[in-house]
Image (spheres, rainbow, N blue to C red):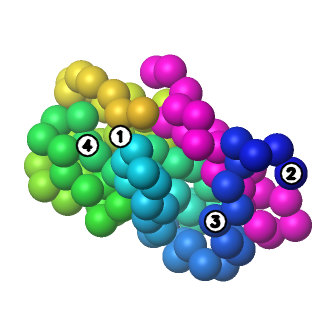
Amino acid sequence: MDPEWLEVGHLEDIPRLGARVVRTPQEDIAVFRTAGDEVFALRDKCPHKGGPLSQGIVHDRSVTCPLHNWCIHLDSGKARAPDEGSTVRYDVRVENRTVYLSLSPVAP
């Protein structure tokens, strides 16, 4: 296995329409699972006031920050208009229902 990919558990370890937090020495990363079993990963900080996105509400392919209701696209990390800003996104992959997280941030 490529060393930049971290095994974070099975798909079922992440609740549907929820998230699991992976703590790294650099930052906390929220790994989200949608209703359709898509998996995305973002820095666990809203670009607005740093709210914990992992505690937000997941809907469609977005998460709503629990602090001020900013809506962030899970696939890009960008805030939905009219809000502006973005959070760091990470690549994830699922193989045989095991979730792997890249620890290399993807530029917005």
Amino acid found under the numbered disc labelled 3: Val
Q: Is residue 94 magenta?
A: yes
Horizontal and vertical percent position of residue 64: 29, 52
Distance between mark 3 and mark 1 Cα atoms: 22 Å
Q: Earlier in the sequence, mark 4 or mark 3?
A: 3
**Residue in the picture at 66% in, 78% down:** 12
- What residue did someone put label 4 on? 46
Assess disc 3: are there few (<14), some (14-19) or many (≥20) residues with their C-alpha within 10 Å of its C-alpha.
Answer: some
Amino acid found under the numbered disc labelled 1: Ile
**Residue 63 appears in view:** no
Horizontal and vertical percent position of residue 93: 74, 50
Assess disc 4: are there few (<14), some (14-19) or many (≥20) residues with their C-alpha within 10 Å of its C-alpha.
Answer: many
Distance between mark 1 and mark 4 Cα atoms: 8 Å
Horizontal and vertical percent position of residue 30: 44, 56
Say if mark 1 contacts mark 4, CB within 8 Å.
Answer: yes
Q: Please state the extent of the stretch shown in magenta in the rendering.
A: 89-108
Q: Which of marks 2 and 4 is nearer the N terminus?
A: 2
| Drawn side of residue 26 relative to residue 83, left or right | right
Distance between mark 1 and mark 2 Cα atoms: 31 Å
**Residue 48 appears in view:** yes
- What residue did someone put label 1 on? 72
Q: Earlier in the sequence, mark 1 or mark 4?
A: 4
